[in-house]
Amino acid sequence: MKIVLLGATGMVGTRIAAEAHTRGHHVTCVSRSGRAPVPGVTSTAADAADTPRIAALAAGHDAVASALVPPRDGSDPREPFLALNRALVDAVRAAGVSRLVVVGGAGSLEVTPGAALVDQPGFPADYLGEALAHRDVLDFYRTVGDLDWTYVSPAAEIGPGERTGKFRIGGDQLLSDAEGHSRISVEDYAAAFVEELESNAHPRTRISVAY
């Protein structure tokens, strides 16, 4: 496949770039720095909010992948992140690409029916704005009916680790293991993400990934 990856130099984006490249896909990595996150990929500098520029980069590709994250400058990230994703959807449409896979958040996953993780007492205040921003974006994608988007939520705990190639795919519910832990390595999350890019198994919906 020919894949355009936005947010390619972040923690998750770097692993997605590596996973896709290892599987033989042609990856065009887009970031503000233009730095290549892994050897062998094409890289270019662009602002993800620049709709004409992103549309031009995405044209002729099979899919667009977004590892964009909300602003982390201390401001309220909700409206800027929503605007960024609206611009991205406009760019994908203008490029004539139908497939869009998005790195999502875990806060909107349900711990019980109708009760999201982000709304639970004790949810970490440091992550509240980011979690709410991701939930707003999920709500937005659920209004997009003309693209084959997939929103991929990680487990509650995600960080660098081992690529085992073993994970579970769920839906809107928070997945936990037998000990009650909800976790996934970034490497296994990236493997699941790229598999979804390849298969288009869950168009126009949210999936979750955990051990």
Image (tube, rainbow, N blue to C red):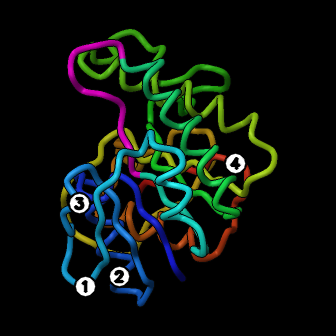
Kind of residue sitting beneath label 2: His
Number of residues whose C-alpha sits closer than 10 Å to that of mark 2, classed few (under 14), some (14–19) or many (20 or more): many
Is 176 displayed left or right of 110 in the figure? left
Spot occupied by residue 68 in the image (x, y as percentages of width and height) = 38, 44
Q: Main secondary structure of the magenta part?
A: loop
Vertical placement of residue 197 versus 112, above or below = below
Q: CA distance from mark 2 to mark 1?
A: 7 Å
Vertical placement of residue 95 versus 178, above or below = below
Q: Nearer the viewer, mark 3 or mark 2?
A: 3
Query: From this viewpoint, which residue is outermost toward the right?
Result: 145
Residue 40, disc: 1
Tag 1 secondary structure: loop
Q: Which residues are magenta?
A: 67-76
Vertical placement of residue 105 versus 52, above or below = above
Q: Is residue 58 magenta?
A: no
Q: Earlier in the sequence, mark 3 or mark 2?
A: 2
Number of residues whose C-alpha sits closer than 10 Å to that of mark 3, classed few (under 14), some (14–19) or many (20 or more): some
Residue 34, disc: 3
- Near-viewer residue (198 or 172): 198
